[in-house]
Image: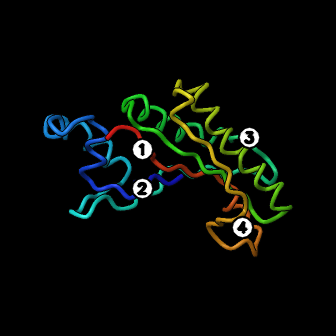
């Protein structure tokens, strides 16, 4: 999963997190660990794309989350519990085996599976996670090999700061 800020300046991100201009200086230290954990660096122009935090892969034609990924997902749910203004979009992907319609449906189910896990096991409010299935249209690597197709059967996530201004 990737976490990134969508065309917001550093100021807008901090303001959306703390809720008002006056609180930014007071709560800046509190949010520095959040931003650092996402691998976000600031410049005057805004936030740069964050680093890859989760790597949730799926077996062919499956939506089951393997136990090996539970620890990583749990870490994100803990961050979401710690920072109640943090919302995410889960984005499901597939390889190119099957019809585009089938893969779109499968990618939706994968994104929903991650959301369901975070809600049921992590206690995150369902409204804070927006699942989207992108099908086979955004491969991370080429689908020409089995290894490439395995890399493309995934769910990624993006931080969504569209709430408060």
> What numbered label is drawn on residue 162?
1
Q: Is 3 positioned to the left or the right of 23 in the image?
A: right
Q: What residue appears at the point 68 percent right and 38 percent down from the top-left corner?
A: 113
Mark 1 Cα shell of 10 Å, populated few (<14), some (14-19), many (≥20): some
Q: Circle 4 — which element? A: helix
Name which of mark 4 and mark 1 comes first in the sequence: 4
Name which of mark 1 and mark 2 comes first in the sequence: 2
Q: How many marks?
A: 4
Q: Nearer the viewer, residue 155 or 160?
A: 160
How far separated are the C-alphas under marks 2 and 3?
A: 29 Å
Name which of mark 1 and mark 3 comes first in the sequence: 3
Q: What residue appears at the point 64 percent right and 65 percent down from the top-left corner?
A: 138
- The reply to whether discs 4 and 1 touch (Cβ–Cβ < 8 Å) is no
Pointer 2 residue: 6
Q: Circle 3 — which element? A: loop
Q: In which quarter of the image is the C terminus?
A: top left
Q: Is 137 positioned to the left or the right of 4 in the image?
A: right
Q: Position of residue 120 (x, y in %)?
A: 61, 25
- The reply to whether discs 1 and 2 touch (Cβ–Cβ < 8 Å) is yes
How far separated are the C-alphas under marks 1 and 2?
A: 9 Å
Mark 3 Cα shell of 10 Å, populated few (<14), some (14-19), many (≥20): few
- The reply to whether discs 2 and 4 touch (Cβ–Cβ < 8 Å) is no
């Amino acid at each position: 999963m990737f976490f990134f800020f969508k065309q917001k300046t550093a100021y807008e991100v901090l303001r959306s997190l703390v809720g008002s201009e006056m609180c930014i200086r007071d709560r800046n230290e509190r949010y520095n660990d959040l931003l650092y954990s996402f691998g976000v660096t600031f410049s005057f122009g805004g936030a740069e794309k964050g680093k890859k935090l989760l790597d949730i892969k799926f077996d062919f034609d499956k939506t089951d989350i393997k136990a090996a990924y539970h620890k990583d997902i749990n870490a994100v749910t803990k961050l979401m519990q710690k920072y109640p203004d943090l919302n995410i979009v889960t984005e499901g992907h597939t390889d190119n085996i099957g019809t585009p319609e089938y893969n779109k449906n499968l990618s939706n189910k994968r994104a929903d599976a991650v959301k369901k896990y975070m809600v049921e096991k992590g206690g995150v409010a369902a409204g804070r996670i927006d699942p989207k299935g992108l099908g086979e249209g955004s491969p991370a690597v080429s689908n020409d090999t089995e290894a490439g197709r395995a890399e493309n059967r995934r769910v990624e996530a993006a931080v969504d700061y569209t709430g408060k201004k």
